[in-house]
Amino acid sequence: MKKILFALCMVLWSVRPGASQVLYGTIVGTIEDAAGALVPGALATANSPASGQSRQTRSNEAGVFRFTDLPPGIYDVSVSARGFRRFALDWLCHTAIPRRCA
């Protein structure tokens, strides 16, 4: 039975479509207050003006938020947390390297 399961896993793994092509990008950020203290649990939002889609996530205990599998494009990224003013940036998300827009 183990041999059959291993063979099935190898077949499924070998037929993954486009495993060598990256079609999506990632936006990652760290949220800190003015004193440099990390802000866990902050709400981060990524909006795509082109598609109208929006995603939300919360920062982890290290203040890090991550949006994965984003189609390339420009994203309006905002962060809000209780007791803090909302902060917003525009990001250009490439398939390999996200960069901040001027």
Image (cartoon, rainbow, N blue to C red):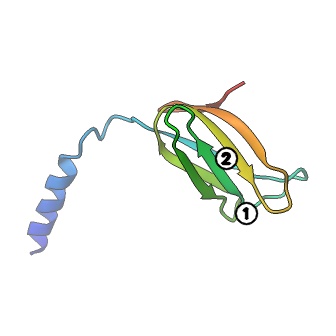
Q: Label 2: few (<14), some or many (≥20) within 10 Å?
A: some
Instruction: Write down the residue under mark 2.
Output: 29
Callout 2 amino acid: Gly
Q: Nearer the viewer, residue 40 or 43?
A: 43
Rendered position, 22 above or below 12: above
Where residue 1 appears, x then y in whole percent? 9, 75
Point out residue 11 in the picture as x, y percentages from the top left corner: 14, 53
Of the two numbered discs 2 and 1 on the same chain, state the one appearing first in sequence: 2
Compared to residue 2, the image places residue 93 above or below, namely above
Task: Name the residue at 66% across, 52% down.
Answer: 44
Evaluate if marks 2 and 1 touch, with contact meaning CB atoms under 8 Å apart: no
The residue at which mark 1 appears reads as 40
Amino acid type at mark 1: Pro
Q: Residue at x 60, y 57 (%)?
A: 57
Q: From this viewpoint, which residue is outermost toward the bottom?
A: 1
The x and y percentages for residue 66 are: 58, 51
The quadrant of the rendering that contains the C terminus is top right
Query: Which numbered circle lies on residue 22?
Result: none
Q: Residue furthest top?
A: 102
Taking depth in this image into account, of 44 and 38 the one nearest to the observer is: 44
Quarter holding residue 38: bottom right
Relative image position of residue 20 (x, y in whole percent) = 31, 37
**Residue 43 quadrant:** bottom right
**Viewed as shown, does residue 71 lie left or right of 49?**
left
Compared to residue 74, the image places residue 34 above or below, namely below
- Label 1: few (<14), some or many (≥20) within 10 Å? some
For numbered disc 2, what is the local secondary structure? strand
Q: Is 57 on the left or on the right of 3, as rendered? A: right
Q: Residue at left 55%, top 50%?
A: 55
Q: Which type of secondary structure does the marked residue at label 1 adopt?
A: loop
